[in-house]
Image (cartoon, coloured by chain):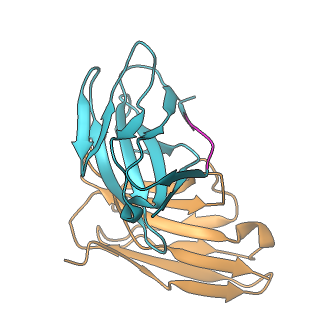
Chain colours: A orange, B cyan
Amino acid sequence: NAGVTQTPKFRILKIGQSMTLQCTQDMNHNYMYWYRQDPGMGLKLIYYSVGAGITDKGEVPNGYNVSRSTTEDFPLRLELAAPSQTSVYFCASRVKGGGQTEAFFGQGTRLTVV
Amino acid sequence: GDSVTQMEGPVTLSEEAFLTINCTYTATGYPSLFWYVQYPGEGLQLLLKATKADDKGSNKGFEATYRKETTSFHLEKGSVQVSDSAVYFCALSASSGNTGKLIFGQGTTLQVKP
């Protein structure tokens, strides 16, 4: 059972570089999310999607972009990386109408911008 | 807006000690409440949940009761083990809207010593 899979697990970027964090889920969940986790700050929502072709901003969207062309995939794009984007990034998914249901998380991508 | 506040960590306990991690929330309506746990190097996984007032969630010896009158969802365990060492996150999912977004507290690190 794969669940939510994120790649890569670790990455070091130089300031100004770009990259895409990949996220795929095999549970046919409509809802998908990207969070970032900073020490002592909990998880902050970057972007979310309620289905293919539909995305919306979360709490901290600046410097990021997303797309959702399929139910399974929800990549997160970083353009012009900055040191403030050094963080651990988590992708998550839930079933449709999932306010009461469990969210499933990937294992995270640890990104360092130098 | 909706928010979650957890007690500051780290919390250090001896094996078999009693654990309480406080969590309070601010939300309109009747949110669902969750505790997620993050073991070192891993993503978050659901520990327990409660979806309406006075509900008690329980799992692996952990319990939490949804208290509407005090807007709290404190996590308790009668006898902790070394294997319980992890970061614990309290979270809510708003009752209004249909996006399933989770709002997290800042996390509490628990260290259990043998």
Q: What stretch is highlighted in magenta?
A: B5-9
Quadrant for the C terminus of chain B in the image = bottom left
Residue at the image point whose x is 21% and y is 67% from the top: A27
Q: Quadrant of residue A46?
A: bottom right
Whole-percent x and y of residue A43?
A: 55, 54
Q: Does the magenta stretch include residue A5?
A: no
Whole-percent x and y of residue B15?
A: 41, 56
Q: Residue furthest top?
A: B69
Q: In which quarter of the image is residue B6?
A: top right
Magenta highlight: main SS: loop
Q: Is residue A65 above or below residue B101?
A: below
Q: Is residue B59 above or below residue B42?
A: above
Depth order, front residue of A75/A67: A75
Q: Is residue A19 visible?
A: yes
Whole-percent x and y of residue B2?
A: 53, 30
Q: Is residue A56 visible?
A: no
Quadrant for the N terminus of chain B in the image = top right
Q: Is residue B113 above or below residue B35?
A: below
Residue at the image point whose x is 28% and y is 34% from the top: B50
Q: Is residue B71 above or below residue B37?
A: above
Q: How many marks?
A: 0
Q: Quadrant of residue A30?
A: bottom left
Residue at the image point whose x is 36% and y is 58% from the top: B81
